[in-house]
Amino acid sequence: MSEALGRRQAQGETQYPAAALLLRAEGELANYSAWIAGLFARDFRRSFPGGGRVLDFGAGPGILAQGFLERTGVRPEGVELDPALRALLIQRGFAGYSSTAELAGCYEAIFSSNVLEHIPDDLAALRDLHERLEPGGILLLYVPAFQAIWTRLDDRVGHFRRYTRKDLAAKLTAAGFKVEHSRYCDSVGFLLALAFRVIGSRNGEPSAWSLRLFDRFLFPISRFLDHFTNRFFGKNVYLKAIRKPIAPLPPAEGRG
């Protein structure tokens, strides 16, 4: 489904195929972006009330990193493959890296929104992130859900897959994590995506007015309905996983 993206990666190209669409989110999906940042900030504060080192994996221009900073007082570092987006991230005052190979040391928390689905070998990426976390550190993921609502937009932005709670949790477990909780988000968005399969634009891109309508009027309704639907369906999956703490050594026999 993402042959074009695969060709770009094989040729060594690093530009995100829908960077312009991502940049639109800051103005046209401001409430939605702020809510995602709030999810990450809330779970981080619960796990590390004293703060810690944080990484935004696939940080884009820093929209979520900025929201996270405003809510926690902690300035994340960012990994962003696209050089233009990474430049914007750095302009916002965040440390920006082109890959995890450039990182030094480990983190108490890593968060990532709508990134994992762009990576051909997502299990390898999860194992890499596992090694970047301190024991007891947390990974917070927000990813697209359900192949049933695959649209032309998924093709256009270079998705390889959409997830269910079950298969995402299985991959986290295979990568060495313990899944603490997961849920579906954005029930209204799920229903809109079904409709978009039929009446969406030819290029797969939602119009500016439809994004603003969703952000200001429909998303608040979606958040309310999610209280009843989050076990069953939604446009996205939100998941928190933990790198298992190192178990203490048993006491040596004969001591005491």
Image (spheres, rainbow, N blue to C red):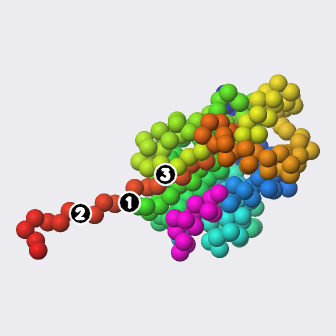
Give the side of residue 251 with respect to residue 156, left or right. Answer: left
Residue 210 appears at what percent x and percent y? 89, 42
Residue 44 appears at what percent x and percent y? 57, 63
Residue identified by numbered label 1: 245
Tell me the amino acid under the disc marked 2: Leu
Residue 174 appears at what percent x and percent y? 42, 41
Q: Quadrant of the C terminus?
A: bottom left
CA distance for labels 1 and 2: 12 Å
Name the residue: 40% across, 55% down.
244
Tell me the amino acid under the disc marked 3: Glu
Above or below, 196 against 211 in this view is above
CA distance for labels 3 and 1: 13 Å
Above or below, 117 against 31 in this view is above
Q: Main secondary structure of the magenta part?
A: helix
Instruction: Tell me if mark 2 has few (under 14), some (14-19) or many (20+) residues whose alpha carbon lies within 10 angstroms of its own.
Output: few
Name the residue: 86% across, 48% down.
217
Residue at the far front: name it.
Answer: 228
